[in-house]
Amino acid sequence: MSTTSVMGGIVRRKEDPSLIQGKGIYVDDKKLHGELAAVFVRSPFAAATITSIDASAARALEGVHAVYTAADVRHLGPTLAQVAVGTLRPLLADGVVKHVGEAVAMVVADDRYVAQDGADLVYVDYDPGQAVVDLKEAFSDAVKVHADQSNTLLTWNGNAWWEGVIDLPDPSPGIQESKLRDDAVVVSLEMINQRLIPTAIEPRAVIAHWSAGYGSVELWSSSQIPHAVAGAVATTFGIPSNKVRVIAPEVGGGFGVKLNVYPDEILTCFASRELERPVRWTETRREAAYSSIQGRGWIGTATITGTRDGTILGYELEAICDMGAYTHNFTVAIPLLGLFVASGQYDIPTSYKLHCVVTNTMTTDAYRGAGRPEAAYYLERIIDAFSRKIGMDPADVRKANFHPPEAFPVQTAIGLTMDTGNYAVNLDSLLERVGYEDLKAKRDAARSEGRLLGIGLSTYVEVCGFGPSGLAGLGFSWAGYGLPTAFNGSGVVRVQPDGTCTVTIGTGPSGQGHETTWAQIVSDGLGIPMENIEVQHGDSLDSPMGVGTFGSRSIAVDGTATFEATQRVKAKAALIAGHLLEAASEDILFADDGAHVAGSPDRAVSWGEIATAAYQPHTLPEGMEGGLEASAMFSPSNATWPFGSHMALVEVDPQTGDVDLLEYWATDDCGNVINPMIVDGQIHGGIAQGVAQALFEEAIYDSDGNFLTGTMIDYALPAAESLPMFQLDRTVTPTDVNPLGVKGIGEAGTIGSAQTVVNAVVDALAHLGVEHIDMPLRPKRVWQAIQDARG
Amino acid sequence: MQVHITVNGIDHGGDVEPRRLLVHYLREDLDLTGTHVGCDTGYCGACTVLVDGRPIKSCTMLTVQADGSKIRTVEGVADGNQLHPVQEGFWECHGLQCGFCTPGMIMSSVALLESNSDPTEAEIRHGIEGNLCRCTGYHNIVRSVQYAGAKMRGETPALGVTAEASS
Amino acid sequence: MYPPKFDYLSPTTLDEALSALSGAENAKILSGGMSLIPLMKLRLVRPATVIDISRIPGLDSIEDRGSHIEIGAMVRTSDTAGNALVREHATALAEAAGSTADLQVRNQGTTCGSIAHADLAADQPAAVLALGATMVAESTRGTREIAAADFFVDTLTSALEPDEILTRIKIPKGGRSVYRKLGRRGGDSDYPIAAAAVWVDTTVGDISEARIALTGVSSKPYLALDAAASVVGTDGSAEAIAAAASHATDGVVVLEDLYGTVDYRKQLAETYVRRALEDLLA
């Protein structure tokens, strides 16, 4: 008999049969008897005073049940946030609006069509004021977004961020001093890391049902964080959290946009309570673009000081980071995540100043990578510029400054500890696979024919798997929603009386394949076949206390909890099997849907027999408790630190500036891999989003704060024809932070890719004198850069 | 207005408002929620269904326009319990992650392969250009369609979990 | 995302449709709906009456009329793209139709609908301009023919009167044509940032006649008359092509938007005229 070990194997996803037949249930698919539909009236102005709202015609429309404005919901307070630095978002605009798309009124009607008819009849008078959109202007504080508050909410200032917790010397004086050296080479670039719209293909959706009889509410929400949403609902309405059930069923992509608590989640509960009917709302694509969170939005100057042998003496970044108008879940903490990986893979003195500034635009928050793509972008772009300046190969400059493998654990420039890393091996593996020297020759040959080929390289470090309970006091907690839990992982493993297994986890997928990966962990531990394991998630009352899917944390934290719970069930099952087989429990092995005595495969019992015994305690050894389940909570001692190296080959059309991404290679290292197919899929999608930032996407507000990219026509997601196949490989450097040795892979592709493509385009044009082009590298910008360089 | 529409082989009659979009008729009146809505402007393709054999975007079609037509949705692609080769391909090649674009992607792929059973990679990418996916970067979707093409041509697909696990 | 209410008419004869249109206030013709329905969903357009012409027999065919081919009002863009007559006699239109939007939109949308909508960056208008097509407009008042050159008046404005339906397009046979574009997502994907349709007659050796049309470049699709004039009478040498291309935007106000500055679009217009001519004369 073979074993059933499935760890590290390619396994078809358990999720897929329902999804490929159109039978998965997303929020908008859920129907409730007697439900009503809501539509929001939203501000067309970026900065204005509301002088009047006339909803009488809307209220009079047949089929409209209610129109709510700030006056109706003011008593509930603002939308809660976890890191509540800045102005929290009102549930509905109260006298003023601060960005285009801000919700002003909510119309509830028989169905969506009628609700929209009603919304058209809500007349709002605005007295427009001056909007602040430009980041430098906002930073100057000449015009304030919020009358009583500086536009700069805070500045993450290098190693001073953790004042009083870690005391490190300030690297800045040393870096300034090194600039005075005779052999110093200083390279500096101002670069924009533009605003993006996460754009999950499933728009956010909610349906709330307040039960007056039970004094409880059930809210279905397309959310990455159902527990936090439940906490926010409970806190807002002043009811205990065990009276709130938030269910996140199939979630059609997250990428951070569903990692927030939104007014609609509170307001549909409110309306349901008032009207005693279920109330649903599904956002339109425009709303997804301008009233759910956006990401990125930095302008900054990166500077490297080094010497001609490739030694980097100092790296500085000062950036203004756009927070938008209101604070959401993590808003001001996103740049902090960039600070965590400020120095990338390099042992270099690093000085960081990140100013978190408000503007009259939609809030920014976590979008795939969240601060880390921005950090990697600035660092890897300026290293490229430095390499060019000193005439050294960019791969060699990087290698010259890597933390060597023997240095781990490495203390970062701001005092965090990186777990494991093997950077040079990873990069060399990529260079060898690509045939780097041949590729450069090919590029040069093409160039001599007048073709513009370019090679781009980037390495990156990610920090993920949050996170240590010790960070709870620094915002890594849901205390902002009345749930003071640290970012633990949790899992419950139960063997049912028939020998099948239910796994209930505190985090749920929005495409990452949790059901499959977690089943692999349990199947590997217990020998129960994959098809007999069901993984449940996404119910704030039934799932163990979880904090959600974000920050590439699920496998490293919740996966580990499930692994631990599995070990506990296994230990008890071994006692039971030993009893049934009259053998010592330490001689029991699990495989093939049962247990047998080591060395005697014929002395076996099935999981059904073990479970039957477990649930009939009179058959168990004296004193053993019945049942066969265990729960575990895992609080890691540290975050995890995946890394990797990416390379791209592009060709630029000199006449049109059109960039053709010809080839893309990535060698990532996320530690141990449970399902390579799923891990590769995460990398594919991550790279696609980074490439999209490099070449296509930009959320644009004009100087008056009008939003110009509210449809998919104007916000150009890459289509199948826009992208090549991705050529992947991996190195494996397990973490020692968790027993599975896994690090997390959800964001790595995005963190590594945007600058890889930009580096390639600049490489194609550098001989013409182009030093930098801001993203997205639309043909017009590339063409303009060529013109400017030619003078 | 009265309409008569055949969906997945079943005749449906009923009274609909002229403004009712086909996708809402399918999802809300017929409870066929496999067809999804992902955008406002007929761009994302999550709502793709086959009307008289051709892929169209049901969020940009009035129900009354479809009066008298035969519609195939993702719920009607499998033959009973037997998955369509395209569905099998998506499962075998990890052609989906969150699954939201998948029904529309499958419908476009079915139409593509019914008109060209051996498309090149470029033809596949062109054939699904009206379907946006945010999760996969299209890499595994292309492989899924290649898998399905091989299967529909009566070949044994070299791609996919089953093939890779036995190799 | 939910269209406002409207009255829906589904006439089964052209006369019925024309009477409905002439009698109605604020009526819109619905053929494929690829422009109209999204605008109604966004509630940017609120017609009182929608007249669906898809059930009128005879409008959905492409016919060979000897000296010209005729494309009916309900011919879907994908059928235009794949039709053998169009590919042979109106290559630029087949190519423009084939690079319009995506497969689903091509299956729903109609060639005539796109022409009548007169979007400044639509693909097919450039082709009908270059091909010297004639638009046939019908109303209860009668039938009139409008030269493509006179058809595109301004952004989203054609020469059609409110009571007229574009029932067919007549494209003369003869000559050779191509359509070349740069789309917003690079290559030929998506709306053109700039595109050129070029038609030439070289039956007697040198270029005896030429038409060059551009779309995406200015407030409407237009014929670059100077560009065409400068290539006529030449043998299509590199110099002649370059000279023609340099006139691509003569006399028009070049558009500036997210995808292109004036200088850039001008350069693109020239580049695509040049590439189209090169491909055509190669």
Image (spheres, grey):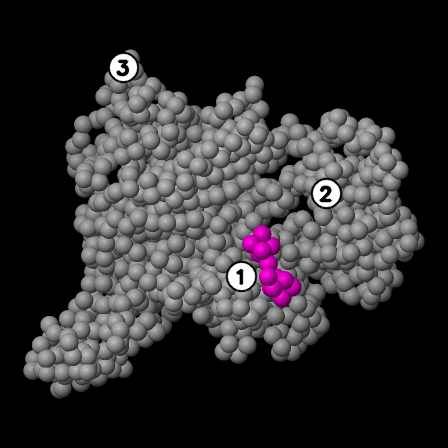
**Type of amino acid under label 2:** Tyr
The residue at 25%/32% (across/down) is A347
Percent across and percent down for residue B7 are 62, 73
Label 2 sits on residue? C179
Percent across and percent down for residue A419 are 21, 45
Q: Secondary structure at mark 2?
A: strand
Please determine whether, in this image, residue B45 is positioned above or below residue A574. above
**Type of amino acid under label 1:** Val
Q: Secondary structure at mark 1?
A: helix
Label 3 sits on residue? A181
Percent across and percent down for residue A725 are 48, 50
Please determine whether, in this image, residue A576 is positioned above or below residue B46. below
In which quadrant is the N terminus of chain A drawn?
A: bottom left
Q: Chain of mark 1?
A: B
Q: Secondary structure at mark 3?
A: loop
- The answer to whether residue A665 is left or right of residue A235 is right
**Type of amino acid under label 3:** Arg
Q: What range of the chain is rendered magenta?
A: B112-124
Res C139 visible = no
The residue at 68%/59% (across/down) is C107
Percent across and percent down for residue A574 are 15, 75
Please determine whether, in this image, residue A676 is positioned above or below residue A523. above
- The answer to whether residue C278 is left or right of residue A376 is right
Marks 2 and 1 sit apart, C-alpha to C-alpha, by 30 Å
Label 1 sits on residue? B145
